[in-house]
Amino acid sequence: MTQLVCDSGSTKATWCLVSDNSKKEIFKTEGYNPYFVTSDQIIQSLQYQLLKELDANSIDKVFFYGAGCSSVENNLSVSSALKKCFPNAEINVDHDLLAAARELLFDKKGFAAILGTGTNSAIYDGKDIVSNIDSLGYFLGDEGSGSYLGKKLLRDHLRNYLPKELNVKFKEICELNKEQIFYRLYNQPLPNRFLASFAIFFGQNKEHEYCQRIVKEGFDDFFENLVSGYSSYKNYSFNCVGSIAYSFQDILTSTANKYEMPMGIIIRSPIDRLVEYHEKFI
C-alpha cells in the first residue's frame, strides 16, 4: 500500500510519500486553498511541481489536509483535481485544522491552533474537531497570522508610520509603490499570500521594538477574539503549528501566560507527526 499524505496551508504544502517498506520521501509544493485556486489550477501546479517527481499511478491512497477545505463544495474542488492527478488512488480531503489537531495531540483531547499565513483554532476530542470559532479569513479576521502582520506592515509603510530605520530596510525588500501594491492586492490572485510574504520582515528585525509590538498586538488579538471565545480554554494547554508561532515563541508564550493558558507544544513543519498519526491510528 503506497500512501501520499499532504499538509497544505495557503502558501505552501508538504507531501510525504509512504511506500510499502515504510520508506518516506518528502516533497514541497505551493499551497492549495480552494478559496483562491480552482481545480484546473491545482492540476496544472501539481503537474509542474509534484507529478514529475513520483509515479502517480502507483499511489493507492491520498490524504490531503488543506486550508479552506471546510465545506463540501471546496473539498469536491480539491478532490476532483487530485483524482485526475492520481487516477488509481482513493482520495481523502479534510481541513488543515484537523491535521493540526492530529499532529499536535494524536488521540488526546485538547486545544489546537494554526498560526501561519492564516489562523485557526479548535477543541479536539482525540478524533475529531468538536468546537471551532471561525477565523473568517484575511479580510475579516485571521488575527495574528502572517497575512495579518503583513497588512499592518504595509499600512504603516504607506502611511509613513514606520520608524525611519525600518522604512529603509523595508524598501530593500519591497520596491513597489502604492499603486503597485494596490494592484497586487485587488487585481492579482492570492492576495493573502502576498500579504503574508511580508511577515518575514518581522523575523529579520525581531529585536526591534516596532516588530515586537506589532507581533504582540497580533497575538493579543488572536487570543482576545478567538482563543478566549472558547468557554473552557483555560482548561487546556496551548498547542500550535505554523511558521509565525514557531518564529515568535517567546511572545506567544508571554501572551498565553497573560490569558492564563499553559503552553503545550509548538511545531513549525509537522508533516512527520501527521504521518506518524496515520501509521498509528488510520
Image (cartoon, helix red, strand yellow):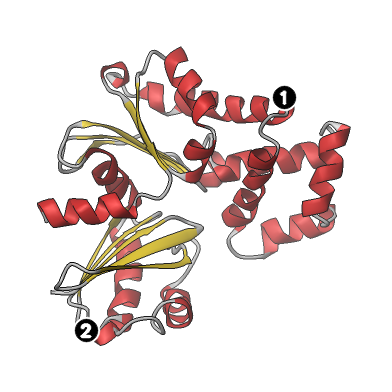
* Horizontal and vertical percent position of residue 31: 46, 62
Q: Is residue 99 left or right of residue 32?
A: left
Taking 40 as reference, is 222 above or below it?
Answer: above
Q: Splitting the image into 4 quarters, where does residue 168 fall?
A: top right
Observer-nearest residue: 60 or 151?
60
Q: Residues within 10 Å of mark 1 (few under 14, many from 20)?
A: few
Distance from the alpha carbon under mark 2 to that under mark 1 = 53 Å
- Residue annotated with mark 2: 58
State the SS at label 2: helix
> Where the C terminus falls, by quadrant?
bottom left
Residue 160 in view (yes/no): no
- Residue annotated with mark 1: 209
* Horizontal and vertical percent position of residue 154: 74, 43
> Where the N terminus falls, by quadrant?
bottom left
Residue 119 in view (yes/no): yes
Q: Is residue 195 left or right of residue 97?
A: right
Q: Amino acid at mark 1?
A: Glu
Residue at image coords 28%, 81%: 86
Q: Amino acid at mark 2?
A: Ser
